[in-house]
Image (tube, rainbow, N blue to C red):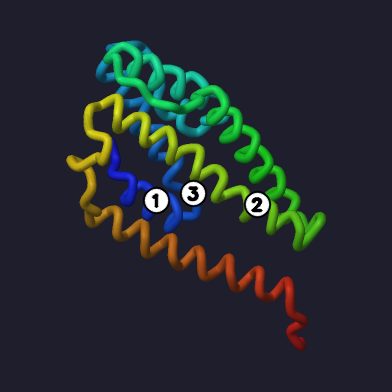
């Protein structure tokens, strides 16, 4: 469980890097709870291959507890996968100076959509765990603040890079 506000702060501040930890933590918790033999690290790194499975397990947990939620786990997972792949491809192209600055913007524009899809999944996870507001995990830790500071620095680099792309700086 993660409080919705904390989720958004960490996800946005880290430019989406929180996603890897988020998937890792969810798969780790699932492994502990079910005692299944799964590897959380690869499932976090290759989240596009495992998002549908995770969202389906959350939905089954909600139904098992007779806890109704108006959400579409398969649709949200598909949105996540499509925009994650789109973002990764655009980022690679931008890194090779192909299609600039459009590819850089595509990668950046994908972030809110990915955030929204995972945020909806987090709300479902919280509900499945019996804490819709994630009260037990709402405070930011010292490690969270370190990641936020690093993320803000990274955001500054992104903004500076986009600014230099759209303006002509004299050499």
| First in sequence: mark 3 vs mark 1 | 1
Q: Hey, which residue is sitting farthest right in the picture?
A: 99
Q: Hey, which residue is sitting farthest bottom in the picture?
A: 170
The correct choice, above or below, for 43 with respect to 115 in the image is: above
Q: Residue at the location (74% across, 79% down)?
A: 167
Instruction: Please state the horizontal and vertical placement of residue 27, each as a whole percent of the image.
Output: 37, 25
Q: Quick check: can you spot residue 47? A: yes
| First in sequence: mark 1 vs mark 2 | 1
For the residues carrying marks 3 and 1, which lies nearer the camera in this image? 1
Residue 8 has which mark? 1
On-image quarter of the C terminus: bottom right
Residue 144 has which mark? none
Instruction: Please state the horizontal and vertical placement of residue 6, each as a whole percent of the image.
Output: 31, 50
Residue under numbered circle 2: 107
Q: Residues within 10 Å of mark 3 (few under 14, many from 20)?
A: some
Q: Residues within 10 Å of mark 1 (few under 14, many from 20)?
A: some
| First in sequence: mark 2 vs mark 3 | 3
Residue under numbered circle 3: 16
Instruction: Please state the horizontal and vertical placement of residue 93, each as a whole percent of the image.
Output: 75, 50
Instruction: Please state the horizontal and vertical placement of residue 109, each as a whole percent of the image.
Output: 63, 53
SS of the residue under disc 1: helix
Q: CA distance from mark 1 to mark 2?
A: 18 Å
């Amino acid at each position: 469980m993660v409080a919705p506000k904390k989720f958004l702060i960490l996800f946005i501040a880290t430019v989406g890097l929180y996603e890897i930890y988020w998937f890792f933590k969810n798969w780790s918790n699932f492994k502990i709870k079910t005692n299944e033999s799964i590897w959380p690290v690869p499932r976090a790194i290759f989240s596009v291959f495992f998002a549908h499975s995770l969202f389906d397990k959350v939905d089954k947990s909600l139904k098992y507890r007779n806890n109704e939620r108006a959400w579409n786990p398969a649709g949200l997972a598909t949105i996540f996968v499509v925009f994650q792949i789109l973002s990764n491809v655009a980022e690679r192209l931008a890194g090779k100076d192909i299609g600039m600055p459009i590819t850089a913007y595509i990668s950046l524009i994908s972030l809110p959509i990915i955030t929204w899809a995972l945020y909806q999944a987090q709300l479902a996870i919280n509900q499945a765990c019996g804490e819709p507001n994630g009260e037990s995990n709402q405070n930011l830790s010292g490690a969270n603040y370190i990641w936020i500071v690093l993320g803000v620095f990274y955001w500054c680099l992104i903004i500076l890079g986009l600014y230099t792309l759209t303006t002509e700086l004299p050499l």
